Image (cartoon, rainbow, N blue to C red):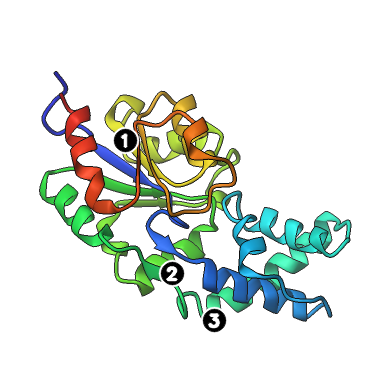
Amino acid sequence: MRNETWPRVVLFDLDGTLVETLPDIQASANGMLAARGLAPLDAKTVRGFIGKGSRNLMQRCLETHGLSPTEADIDDALRDFTIHYDREPVAGSFVYDGVVPFLERLRAGGHRLAVCTNKQKGTAVQVLDALGILQYFEAVVGGDDVVHRKPDPRHIDHVLTLMDLERADALFVGDSENDIEAATAADIPCIAVTFGYNSVPLEELSTVALVDHYDEIWPHVAGLRT
């Protein structure tokens, strides 16, 4: 039987897992495109680009317009996107229903919490703080904090090292193939929410459970402790 405090830490993805961030990501991406005389992209298109970090997002936005951006082009686009995003990071974003009660329950049970996101750390912290949930997390590790980002399991390892924990101590909650593949490679159980930004059917990936609402997660967490 696992220790009663297991999981010692619950790791969360950010975009599409804890927070609906698409409205502000889309607005900022379109601000970057407008500065280059390019047409805006609709929400469905931008949604498909979220999950692999802001640089990848910029590259995909530019490529959608038939461009072949250089690294310098992507750097410039990322700078402009970040300026837009940092100005209004949560104008349309919101914490998903049920997140706060779930975080409260975990904290009350002695579980430690952290965020493992491909988003840039500064922006991630700003979003979490503006939406009032930053205080729940001991660590926030962004894509720019590590050399190897999700789906590479070393992103998770970096978080655990910071917290002086091991893979066997962790549970992951995410929404996309990046999260699930990283957790699977690290041999960490993963619960996936179905309302996020996945680009492949989650049923095809290895998860403990798929949940449609945070109210459904706790029984799976409790079941893993036995």
Instruction: Measure the alpha-carbon separation of dots 2 and 1.
Output: 24 Å
Q: Quadrant of residue 161?
A: top left
Residue at (55% x, 43% y) in the render: 146
Q: Pointers 3 and 1 in contact (CB under 8 A)?
A: no
**What residue is shown at x 47% (from left), y 34% (from top)?**
203
Q: Position of residue 176 (x, y in %)?
A: 50, 44
Whichever of callouts 2 and 3 sits on the residue coming sooner in the sequence is: 3
| Earlier residue among tags 2 and 1 | 2
Residue at 44%, 37% (x, y): give it. 156
Q: Is residue 77 left or right of residue 97?
A: right
Characterize the local packing of mark 1: few (<14), some (14-19) or many (20 or more) Cα atoms within 10 angstroms. Answer: many
- Element on which disc 2 rests: helix
- Type of amino acid under label 1: Leu
> For mark 2, what is the residue?
126
Which residue matches tag 3? Answer: 87
Q: Which residue is mark 1?
A: 171
- Could you tell whether 125 is left or right of 83 in the image? left
**Which amino acid lies under the numbered mark 3 shown in the image of this protein?**
Arg
Element marked by disc 3: helix
Q: Give x and y (percent) for residue 147.
A: 60, 41
The reply to whether the C-beta atoms of the residues labelled 2 and 1 are less than 8 Å apart is no
